[in-house]
C-alpha cells in the first residue's frame, strides 16, 4: 500500500477531520482514508445520453398520443 502525505492543510480542516474522526470513533488517519475512498472510488455518474440509451423500447410515439375529448366534463355530486 502507498503512503500519502498531505501538506499545507489549514488548522481548521485538520481540526474538522479530528472532530469527524472522534464522532466515528476512529483515528484521524482512518477518517482521512475513509473520506478519500468515499469520494474517489464511488461509481462514475452516467451521462444523460447513456441513461436514454438504457431506456427500454416500450412502443411507438403514437401509442402515447393524447386523445382529445371534446365532450363537456361530467360534474360529480
Image: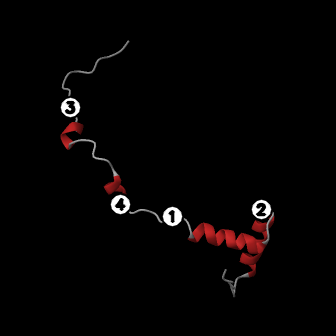
User: Split into 4 quadrants, where in the image is the C terminus?
Assistant: top left
- Image quadrant where residue 63 sits: top left
Identify whether 26 is placed above or below 12.
Answer: above
Q: Marks 2/1: CA distance?
A: 24 Å
- Image quadrant where residue 64 sits: top left
Earlier sequence position, callout 2 versus callout 4: 2
Identify whether 33 is placed above or below 49.
Answer: below
The residue that disc 1 covers is: 43
Helix, strand or loop status at disc 2:
helix
The residue that disc 2 covers is: 24
The residue that disc 3 covers is: 67
Q: Marks 3/1: CA distance?
A: 42 Å
> Which mark is in front, 3 or 4?
4
Earlier sequence position, callout 1 versus callout 4: 1
Earlier sequence position, callout 3 versus callout 2: 2
Q: Position of residue 12 (x, y in %)?
A: 74, 77
- Image quadrant where residue 4 sits: bottom right
> Which mark is in front, 3 or 1?
1
Q: Say if mark 3 contacts mark 4, CB within 8 Å.
A: no
> Which mark is in front, 3 or 2?
2
Earlier sequence position, callout 2 versus callout 1: 2
Q: Position of residue 62 (x, y in %)?
A: 18, 39
Q: Marks 2/4: CA distance?
A: 37 Å
Q: Residues within 10 Å of mark 4 (few under 14, many from 20)?
A: few
Q: Marks 3/4: CA distance?
A: 31 Å
The residue that disc 4 covers is: 50
Q: Nearer the viewer, residue 74 or 21?
A: 21
Helix, strand or loop status at disc 4:
helix
Amino acid at each position: 500500500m502507498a503512503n500519502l502525505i498531505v501538506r499545507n492543510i489549514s488548522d481548521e480542516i485538520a481540526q474538522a477531520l479530528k472532530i469527524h474522526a472522534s464522532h466515528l470513533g476512529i483515528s484521524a488517519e482512518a477518517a482521512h482514508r475513509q473520506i478519500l475512498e468515499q469520494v474517489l472510488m464511488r461509481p462514475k455518474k452516467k451521462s444523460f445520453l447513456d441513461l436514454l440509451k438504457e431506456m427500454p423500447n416500450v412502443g411507438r410515439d403514437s401509442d402515447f398520443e393524447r386523445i382529445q375529448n371534446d365532450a363537456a366534463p361530467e360534474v360529480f355530486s
